[in-house]
Amino acid sequence: MNEQITVIPTILCGGAGTRLWPLSREQHPKQLLPLSGSNSLLQQTAVRLAGIKGHVNISPRTLVVCNEQYRFLIAEQLREIGLPGTDILLEPAGRNTAPALALAALHAEKERPGQLLLVMPSDHVISNRFAFHDAVIRGLPVAAQGCIVAFGVMPVRPETGYGYINAGAVDERGALPIIRFVEKPDRNTAQQYIACGGYFWNSGIFLVRADIWLKALTAFAPAMVEACERAHHNGVRDMDFFRIHRDAFISCPADSIDYAVMEKLPSHPELGIGGFVIPLDAGWSDLGSWDAVWTAAEKDASGNSVSGDALLEDTRNSLVHADGRLVACVGLDDIVVVETADAVLVARKDRVQNVKHIVAKLKRIGRVEASLHRKVARPWGTYDCVDIGERFQVKRIIVKPGAVLSLQMHHHRAEHWIVVRGTARITRGDESLLLSENQSTYIPLGVRHRLENPGKVPLELIEVQSGSYLGEDDIVRFEDLYGRRKDPSA
């Protein structure tokens, strides 16, 4: 049976990861960061099925559902790892995981009915890939028969940050029928779950036929399916992406896979859709907070996880991350220290769940550090704001080989450009200039201009802005290769 059905790796790439601030930001969330290894969590997820053995037909195309503001970062990261093919569905707004999976199911059914979706959040770590493969293979016949398979992790501690699945006795397929889904418990309840057995951490990973998911969702949330059908039907292909129709999707109710379907499924046997758990023992972690990152990381003899330029003295069981400067720690126990170019976090390890409250405060008072790093990725490269003052701003700009910025104009600022490395082709009004290392030019306020890198090495330049307003939204785009004319801040 496994040979007859194709499994589509389906990655849900949403979430802001606010508990991992200051590394994770609203416009560069944790799934796009290398929090465990050299690849980002998204990249690790995308290659998780590589090398799977047995009679498993893995689709050559991966489905990714993500917020449209991450589209270029996601596409670039997938290109970096040489993923052979990807369908990237762009949500115009976040509506949680149930609508995201509905969009993926609709897309898969349109291409070829009856395929299995292996649904994976993009921000998890699985240290034993081959154990994960074994669990997936055990789940294939169960899902192929029209059941929804959830992968449950055997709890090793009374964790209060995860939801739990209560399951019955194992059947001949190695699957356990789901009795109920339970929300994140308090510590005493979590201890009871571990003591009595039959409870698993909810990993958020599912295996389900696309048509079965749509059938279940139609039974429990018909308005959601109707909105997703309209949004997908009226979607359009845009470069490497499939852009979901905005107005139709905005009307879609928001809900999670658990709330929308999985919690209701055991009480409705008349649907004929069983819910089962496949136990997963593969070193799983959702890296939802800094203490989870510390737990999953390699540690020294004193229990410290250290990355970057850091010196520790008389420090134990702590996580220290230095992004750009030397960080020195003396006499610390169970502390988290995370340093970035524009923010530093210091917290007790048992209080890191409350980092999200700091992010909420930053948003409330309008601080940019809630959403952006100092170094910002763009589809053409990056810029880093190295200095800012009254009426001026200095940026270091890197333009990828062959990349072209939009033809644009600013109402409130002028710009000076100095080439540090590479070659720049510059459009300035009716002029076209070719500048090399140590050459410079001036872009007056209100003049149409464009920057491009015609060379084969990255173009590096220093930009000095001066004017009455220096915000990123002071851009009028006339032409843009990346479809951003209506999004001035992108």
Image (cartoon, rainbow, N blue to C red):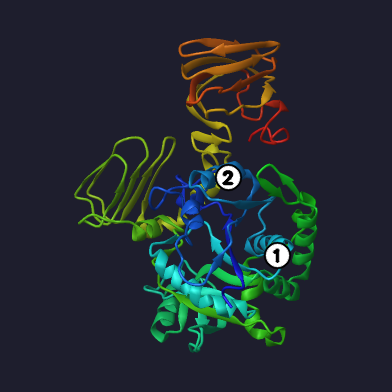
> Are there few (<14), some (14-19), or many (20+) residues within 10 Å of tag 2?
some
Q: Percent from the top left, x then y, of residue 255?
A: 66, 65
Q: Would residue 3 be seen by someone viewing this image from the given angle?
A: yes
Q: Percent from the top left, x then y, of residue 141?
A: 56, 79
* Residue 445 drawn above or below residue 319: above
Which of these two is toward me, 332 or 33? 33
Counting residues from the start of the chain, the first of labels 1 and 2 encountered is 2
Q: Secondary structure at mark 1?
A: loop
Figure label count: 2
Instruction: Tell me the quarter of the picture where residue 345 sits.
Output: top left
Q: Percent from the top left, x then y, of residue 43?
A: 48, 51
* Residue 216 drawn above or below residue 364: below
Q: Percent from the top left, x then y, of residue 168?
A: 51, 87
Q: Would residue 27 be seen by someone viewing this image from the given angle?
A: no
Instruction: Please give the label number shown on residue 66.
Output: none
Residue at mark 2? 75
Residue at mark 1? 112
